[in-house]
Image (cartoon, rainbow, N blue to C red):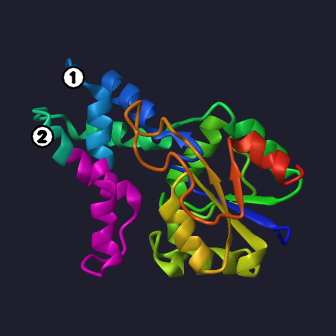
Amino acid sequence: MTQPQALLFDVFGTVVDWRTSVAREAAAFLSADLDWEAFADAWRERYQPAMQEVRSGRRPWTILDVLHYENLQTVLQSFGLHDVPDDRLAELNQAWHRLDPWPDTVAGLERLKRRYIIAPHSNGNICLLVNMAKRAGLPWDVILGAEVVRAYKPLPESYKRAVATLGRAPDQCMMVAAHNGDLRAAQAQGLQTAFVARPREHGEQQSTDLTPSGDWTIVAEDFEDLAAQLGA
């Protein structure tokens, strides 16, 4: 293995626990007796279809905060929650800015930061990722929000432009993710890859991405294990 110089991290699910966090936020903001984890799942299910409208060119470039807001309005209706005031909608949409890290995340990133450039390579927009990092104590060297690359993963341009922004060759960068599809797309562009399983991202019944499904450079149990394998 060629020693990487920079580590690029998927964020939603890999760095932070979006499901539990969004469910907590929704329960606090909306006065109703609902299955809030199901609510979080429903909101998240609209994530990829919304971005696909942008990826396909059917919709002009639109940041994730806007897509999340539009998806929230649809999900509220499907759960029978009508006439939620706009200010409450806007504040609840900020739930994605307040996601909690997994227990190993911060300590692992701090170790990796001592030796490598570390950056999020997320479909999240810069404001979202900065707010999340400030709240959760994520010690990024630089924020590579989606506005930087102007393309949503897994489009090839997303990985190519992220690497170019750091002034590195693809094989000098390693994509770290809990999602095999993300790693497969990064690997196709010449990046090294690290799979870190997050078997509770989708709750106890999760059936996807429980194990690595590709020939990844590293397979790690968590960020602390990743740091150990990379000598950090």
Residue at screen point 47% across, 71% down: 154
Q: Relative to 125, is 93 above or below?
A: above
| Residue wearing tag 2 | 78
Instruction: Check disc 1 and give the amino acid type.
Output: Leu
| Residue wearing tag 1 | 34
Horizontal and vertical percent for residue 130? 59, 50
Q: Relative to 96, is 145 above or below?
A: below
Relative placement, left or right, of 58 versus 218 is left
Q: Is residue 178 magenta?
A: no
Q: CA distance from mark 2 to mark 1?
A: 12 Å
Q: Is residue 64 magenta?
A: yes
Predominant SS of the magenta segment: helix
Classify mark 1: helix, strand or loop.
loop
Instruction: Check disc 2 and give the amino acid type.
Output: Ser
The span picked out in magenta is 45-73
Horizontal and vertical percent for residue 22? 39, 34
Relative placement, left or right, of 74 versus 13 is left
Residue at screen point 51% across, 67% down: 146
Horizontal and vertical percent for residue 61? 37, 74
